[in-house]
Amino acid sequence: MRLLPGFLSVERQRTLLAEVRAVVARAPLYSPAMPRSGSPYSVRMSNCGSHGWLSDRSGYRYSETHPVTGALWPGIPSPILELWNETTGVAYAPEACLINCYGPTARLGLHRDQDEAAKDAPILSISLGDTALFRLGGPERKSPTRSFRLGSGDLMILEGPSRHWFHGVDRILPGTSQLLPEGGRINLTLRRVTIP
Ligand code: MD6
Ligand code: FE
């Protein structure tokens, strides 16, 4: 795992936020449902890129289209693509950018990201807004975990073995950032889906 705390200047965070707002204007945040149970996540989601990650009663998958509007996802904005090129060290482009939006009480359970055919490609995480208490474990659900804060402008790259480690968001710390006037946290995860 590679943590790049404070990688983004406030100016760069604002640029990314404006790009995310423009994406969400075309591809609105929706409330995904858990496989089988259909219970809703506390996190709202959207995507940009040729592939968008979805969760619903029938399972997890990548789709070219928004589950509510049926429209193709907007492209990944160039300031976001540039961050991938600056930090990951891989020559291929990302295909999916999952947008996770947290209110003050939202959380994300321990999981692994395993729906990508490009299973060893790095995942770049970009945090904006309120600080998250992030938990990173190991290769098995029962592996020991440690938790640390992800604040606005921090980047994290899961690569190598850590690409397959369990992780989640225990909670967010309301009022820790001024970036989002409405409060809360936005996390972007950039992924390669198909084998490069
Ligand atoms: C989040 N992040 O920070 C959730 N997944 O809101 C993730 O689930 C995640 O940060 C894969 C790689 C990096 C991540
Ligand atoms: Fe994840």
Image (cartoon, rainbow, N blue to C red):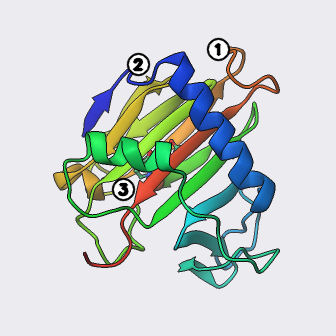
Instruction: Check disc 1: other Cα within 10 Å, few if <14, some if 14-19, many if 20+.
Output: some
Secondary structure at badge 2 equals: loop
Callout in the foreground (1, 3): 1
Q: Nearer the viewer, mark 2 or mark 3?
A: 2
Badge 2 crowding class, 10 Å Cα cut-off, few under 14, some 14 to 19, many 20 or more, is: some
Kind of residue indicated by mark 3: Arg
Quickly name the residue at label 2: 6
Question: Left or right of 23: which side holds 12?
Answer: left
In this picture, is 173 found above or below 84? Answer: above
Work out whether mark 1 precedes mark 2 in sequence or the reverse, and give the earlier one.
2
Type of amino acid at the residue the image marks with label 2? Gly
> Which residue carries the number 3 mark?
141
The quadrant of the rendering that contains the C terminus is: bottom left
Could you say where residue 135 lies in the image, as x and y percent from the top left? 43, 37
182 versus 16 height, above or below:
above
| Disc 2 from disc 3: Cα separation | 29 Å
In the shown orientation, is residue 95 left or right of residue 92? right
Tell me the element at label 1. Answer: loop
Residue that extends furthest to the bottom in the rendered view of this protein: 58
Amino acid under disc 1:
Thr
> SS class of the residue under badge 3?
loop
Which quadrant of the view contains residue 185?
top right
Where does residue 79 sit, x and y in percent of width and height? 48, 42
Mark seen at residue 176: 1
Indicate which label's residue lies in the foreground, 1 or 2. Answer: 2
Q: Residue at x 38, y 41 (%)?
A: 83
> Where the N terminus falls, by quadrant?
top left
What residue is at 73 percent from the left and 44 percent from the top? 21
